Image: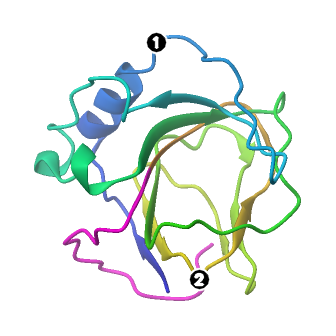
Amino acid sequence: MILYQDNFLNQSEINHLLGLWDNDKPVHPIMKYNLTFYYLNFMTNDLDLTPIKDGIFERRKFYKMRLQKYNESINQTEYFHGHMTTHNYIIYLNEEFEGGELEFEQGLLVKPKTGSLVYFNNNEKHRVKNCIGDRYIFTALGDTKLDIKYKIHKKSIL
């Protein structure tokens, strides 16, 4: 299942998340898929997420929560991959770059839009297209489904 919510975060929430970015962290490869990115790990850094949707992203609900940065210096995987976690949330924090679309194996292509949320379960294999410029996202991966009211339920998002 893939769900999309436009304008999930407001500009104040986006600014809060982007304000937590300090410096580029070392690139950490995920060797299985040859995937790399810069990231700030919310599970090991005690950073305040309570301003984001009234604290809905609690650390205890997730296995991974990151602020991630991709750009043309980082090659994205050409392979579709999935996650072990049941519930996967990606929030786009900017759109001032080219490319960077989220592509699902079944053919859906999601164009990044600032503040939008993409939810998908672990059955949905996906990959990210290469981008030019800095692409920032917030990801939360876990087995707890959040109580989010999606306004848009559709299979074609572009």
Q: CA distance from mark 2 to mark 1?
A: 34 Å
Along the viewing direction, whichever of 9 and 32 lies nearer the viewer:
32
Q: Position of residue 95 (x, y in %)?
A: 58, 44
| Residue under pointer 2 | 123
Q: Which numbered dot is residue 157?
A: none
Task: Write the residue at 71% across / 25% down.
Answer: 27
Q: Determine the main secondary structure of the stretch shown in magenta.
A: loop
Task: Write the residue at 75% across / 80% down.
Answer: 105
Along the viewing direction, whichever of 10 and 65 lies nearer the viewer:
65
Q: How is the image coloured?
A: rainbow
Give the mark, 2 or 1, whose residue is nearer the N terminus: 1
Along the viewing direction, whichever of 151 and 145 lies nearer the viewer:
145
Element type at mark 2:
loop
Q: Give above or below for 50 relative to 6.
A: above
Q: Is residue 57 visible?
A: no
| Residue under pointer 1 | 22
Are dots 2 and 1 in contact, CB under 8 Å? no
Q: Is residue 147 visible?
A: yes
The residues colored magenta run 140-158
Task: Write the residue at 49% across / 74% down.
Answer: 120
Give the residue type that dot 2 points to: Asn
Q: How many marks?
A: 2
- Image quadrant in which you'd find residue 14: top left
- Image quadrant in which you'd find residue 149: bottom left
What is the residue that sits farthest to the top in this orientation? 23
Q: Give above or below for 123 relative to 83.
A: below
Give the residue type that dot 1 points to: Asp
Q: Residues within 10 Å of mark 1 (few under 14, many from 20)?
A: few
Does 124 lie within the magenta span? no
What is the residue that sits farthest to the left in this orientation? 54
Q: For this view, does 39 lie left or right of residue 31?
A: left
